[in-house]
Amino acid sequence: YGGKTYELEGNDTRGNAIHGFCLTRPWRIAEQSASRVVGEFQASKDDASILKKWPADFKIAVSYELQGNTLVSTIAITNPDDKPLPHGFG
């Protein structure tokens, strides 16, 4: 990407890099109530070593909320950096 090679860490049982950088790292609780919780992870704040392995900083916020008998999840990926952020989510 951008003329540089980036190699992702293997993080499944077969050594594939299918879950990104955040699967095994601690997240911060940004908000919590009786029916909602929001976790955040930002590379520069939570594990700056990632910035040596990826071209830009990133922030992920994941919320889980009970709305009646439904669990709603919202995922937001933002780029706090001044460089382009390649990413994927699936």
Image (cartoon, helix red, strand yellow):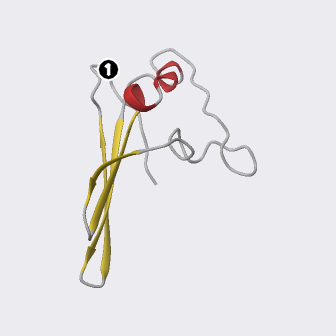
Q: In the rendered image, which residue does mark 1 sit on? A: 83
Left/right placement of residue 14 relative to residue 50 reads right
Q: Nearer the viewer, residue 60 or 2?
A: 60
Depicted 52 relative to depicted 78: above or below: above
How far from the left and from the top, in percent, is residue 23? Answer: 54, 47
- Residue extending farthest to the right is 14
- Residue extending farthest to the bottom is 69
- How packed is label 1: few (under 14 Cα within 10 Å), some, or many (20 or more)? few
> Which amino acid, mark 1?
Lys
How far from the left and from the top, in percent, is residue 66? Answer: 28, 74
How far from the left and from the top, in percent, is residue 59? Answer: 34, 37
Left/right placement of residue 26 relative to residue 30 reads right
For the point 30% across and 85% down, the residue is 69
For the point 53% across and 16% down, the residue is 4
Local SS, label 1: loop
For the point 44% across and 22% down, the residue is 55
How far from the left and from the top, in percent, is residue 80? Answer: 27, 28
For the point 29% across and 32% down, the residue is 79
Depicted 52 relative to depicted 23: above or below: above
Q: Quadrant of residue 68?
A: bottom left
Q: Quadrant of residue 36?
A: bottom left
Left/right placement of residue 37 relative to residue 7 reads left
Q: Nearer the viewer, residue 7 or 11?
A: 11
Q: Nearer the viewer, residue 32 or 45?
A: 32
Number of dots carrying numbers? 1
